[in-house]
Image: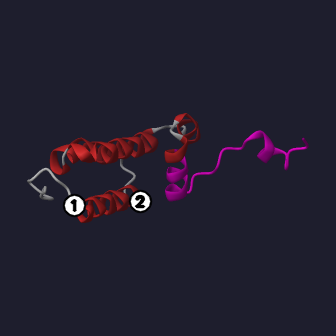
Amino acid sequence: MIPSSGSGAESDSEATQRRGLLDGLVRACDVPGLLGDIADLIPDVFGPESAEEAERLRTFAAYHAAPDKAAFLQRSDPDLAIVIRRIWGSAKPAGPALRGGPSKR
């Protein structure tokens, strides 16, 4: 079990370590149930300041559970969709200018 700081105040070092831990997790794990379960535990372990990371982990869980990953990414927050594509090698969506070469406008 990862200990919380106890005081409620988190140092920059602790926040960096937490983000590093969660970044490693989203890069290594593609099991939706496990990611979702860990996301549920994050605020209890790290405190309310970790809610954003928990939500990001839930998004990764939803991505891995989605039957149509491209459609899921199109509905997702654009910045998070870019991160997911970079980590998991998902293809970029084909926009109008990408399908037929450069735009003729």
Residue 65 rendering spot, x and y as whole percentages? 42, 40
Q: Quadrant of the C terminus?
A: top right
- Horizontal and vertical percent position of residue 75: 54, 34
Question: Which badge, 2 or 1, comes first in the chain's sequence?
Answer: 1
Q: Which secondary structure lies at badge 1?
A: loop
Element on which disc 2 rests: helix
Image side of residue 49 versus residue 88, left or right:
left
Residue visible at 51% across and 56% down in the picture: 88
What label sits on residue 27 in the rendered view?
Answer: 2
Residue situated furthest top in the rendering:
75
Q: Does 67 sit above or below residue 46?
A: above
- Tag 2: amino acid: Arg
- Label 1 sits on residue: 11
Local crowd at mark 1 within 10 Å, few (<14), some, or many (≥20)? few
Q: What is the crowding at mark 2: few (fewer than 14 residues within 10 Å), some, or many (at least 20)? A: few
Please give the label number shown on residue 25.
none
**What x and y, as percent, mark residue 61?**
38, 43
Query: How far across and how far down the image is residue 13, in percent?
Result: 25, 65
**97 part of magenta stretch:** yes
- Asked if residue 66 is among those painted magenta in the image, a careful observer would answer no
